[in-house]
Image: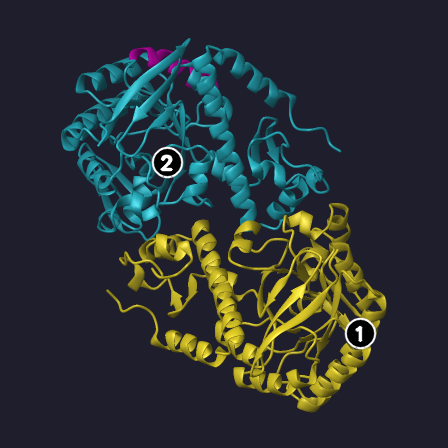
Chain colours: A yellow, B cyan
Amino acid sequence: MTDFSFTLLATDGMARRGRIDTSRGDIRTPAFMPVGTAGTVKAMYPEQVRATGADIVLGNTYHLMLRPGAERVAALGGLHRFMDWERPILTDSGGFQVMSLAKLRKLTEKGVTFRSHIDGSAHELTPERSIEIQTLLDSDIVMQLDECIALPAGRAEMERAMELSLRWGERSRAAFGRRPHRALFGIVQGGDDAGLRARSAAGLISIGFDGYAVGGLAVGEPQETMFRVLDEVTPELPAERPRYLMGVGKPDDILGAIARGIDMFDCVHPTRAGRHGHVYSRFGVINLKNARHRDDPRPIDEQSPNENCRRFSRAYLHHLVRSEEILGAMILSQINLAYYQELVAGARDAIAAGTFTDFAAETRAGWARGDLPTL
Amino acid sequence: MTDFSFTLLATDGMARRGRIDTSRGDIRTPAFMPVGTAGTVKAMYPEQVRATGADIVLGNTYHLMLRPGAERVAALGGLHRFMDWERPILTDSGGFQVMSLAKLRKLTEKGVTFRSHIDGSAHELTPERSIEIQTLLDSDIVMQLDECIALPAGRAEMERAMELSLRWGERSRAAFGRRPHRALFGIVQGGDDAGLRARSAAGLISIGFDGYAVGGLAVGEPQETMFRVLDEVTPELPAERPRYLMGVGKPDDILGAIARGIDMFDCVHPTRAGRHGHVYSRFGVINLKNARHRDDPRPIDEQSPNENCRRFSRAYLHHLVRSEEILGAMILSQINLAYYQELVAGARDAIAAGTFTDFAAETRAGWARGDLPTL
């Protein structure tokens, strides 16, 4: 069985091209991980997710622990078997969604107690229990439990949450132990404060993780703040470990974060936007609900490598979205996930060729030119 | 271009095996036509519909005339191009759904006026306008406008609606004209009265249609009434034309109607039931919402030719249904449509082999044995 490892293949400025090897296949970085919230990337068959170019998907510990339950998934052979996805899975720790979705949350040094948003049942999540759940799910990349706070926040609050996350990181590391075929990632916290971020990174590195995530971004702050924090944080992280920016983002965020040395991304945005009639393309965002598409026989993008962008007219997609047809959610989720994969694949090629800056500028210029002129 | 024609290939009792040739491909009968209500068989890509074995799909004139509009579909190249389904399409007349869905309906000799259930806009549907709409959609098999009443109903009411439907059949025939590559079907009405049904059939035959539908069934009456009416009606219909039982039905209805000489079926039931967590299988109906499936690692049917019946556990499908995940609707719609196609394919083979009675009995015995024992 292949051990977990990261190989840095090329750099271009701060941007990195790499490969993560795992026992369930390799992950080309920069990588975008589609989010399979509750054991399914919404509105997509697993083979369709793979066909877009995804090497890995993300599973949400919070959702899966509540329904169907981690012990149940384990008894059924693990999350890969459960959802019929045989390639790598990264699971989050559950902490972020406890904070955003659960009810009656109570945070202590030990962990967090809360009630399920589904049925009100009481649950506890500690660093040790989060590792246990992710192990039951048979996750390939396990995340430490952390406390993620919204921005803006005061320095004292950011420091408290960062220090707690560090202590939880240490407990997570102890609970995880040593497993060569699986990886545990630590999470840098510290809000928008460079000093706190540096202390967080140093603390995590001294504990020692298989990869380092940057958490606590894309939580309400402007993009320039996120980029500034990345400028400050990524130089603090070891070059020989993968770096994961959690919960990010829109295509422009991803380009900017790749330029700042990030290797991995996840976000619900492409599938959620698809379910709401928004399409990502080399023309930027297209809102298919808009009446301008109602009579438009043109496809989304006749030069796209993605068949769904060529075969259906905008008028048809407009109709499906307006009629709230499931097929609309299916097609637009696929188109968005494929575009995200096209974006990171383009970035990988450009980094290998030493042309990432040009690639990013050309891609952004395409978005700025906007959609096809109205017929 | 191939003219529309029907070839009777074999009979077995009253059951018939045949082939309808059209300019867009042939239709093996007995045929089940998935319903593509608003330009999509719900939760299915067109190639997935085809892969289940469907030779033809149905489009709903009522839905399509309201949204996106027949003239718009025509300007976009017709319904086949619109939904990317290149094989034959049958469109209904719109009459049935005006009666079941529209608001402020007013029926006259001329036709029916109503308001859209979507936006309240005013519309009129006459026999001539229905033909015009179906022609704009570029339907391969066009249905006459008729008046379909619920059962039970009084004889006078059944007679009035049957006579009106006959006069509308004559106007539909005149409006349609002669088009060798397209077909117009008449619709036998007359409720549950054998005499009225016979008069309706004779009247339609004297007008002359390319096929004959039996309408006004599966509208609230018991199955035995439906079968009795079919016993009375099908012998009145010409052997050399296809016979279509509209809006039917569940698998057992389909077996019974095939035994009585019906060649074509359509029903929303398999896709709608799938969206509600019900699966049709050789074990009968399986309600995946039921807690008995929660921990069941077994697939729906490991001997099924359909991969979706073998690859996902019942526990996973239960989870998707309980979580109201779109993938659940996608998988279960596919499983049900595939089972319906398996059923009519089995019927076709059995009729050709002269073993339809045995096939129907064995199939029903499988349903009666029920689902796998609980683990």
Q: Quadrant of residue A17?
A: bottom right
Q: Which of the 4 image quadrants contains residue B288? A: top right
B302 in magenta = no
Give, as a three-letter code, the residue at label 2: Val
Describe the element under mark 1 as helix, strand or loop.
Answer: helix
| Most foreground residue, A370 or A192 | A370
**Magenta span includes B234:** yes
Q: Chain of mark 2?
A: B
Q: Using the image, determine if residue A174 lies above or below residue B311.
A: below
Q: Is residue A1 above or below residue B138?
A: below
Which residue is disc 2 drawn over? B57
Provide the residue span drawn in magenta.
Answer: B222-236
Looking at the picture, how far across and down is residue B230, in whole percent?
38, 16
Residue carrying label 1:
A168
Q: Position of residue B363 (x, y in %)?
A: 56, 19
Residue type indicated by callout 1: Trp
Quadrant placement of the N terminus of chain B: top left
Which residue in the rendered view is the most extreme toward the top? B13
Chain name for mark 1: A
Q: Nearer the viewer, residue A217 or B59?
A: A217
| Distance in Å between CA atoms under marks 1 and 2 | 57 Å
Judged left or right of residue B119, residue A226 is right
| Crowd tier of the residue under label 1, counting other residues whose Cα lies within 10 Å: few below 14, some 14–19, many 20 or above | many
Residue sitting at x 44%, y 58%: A332
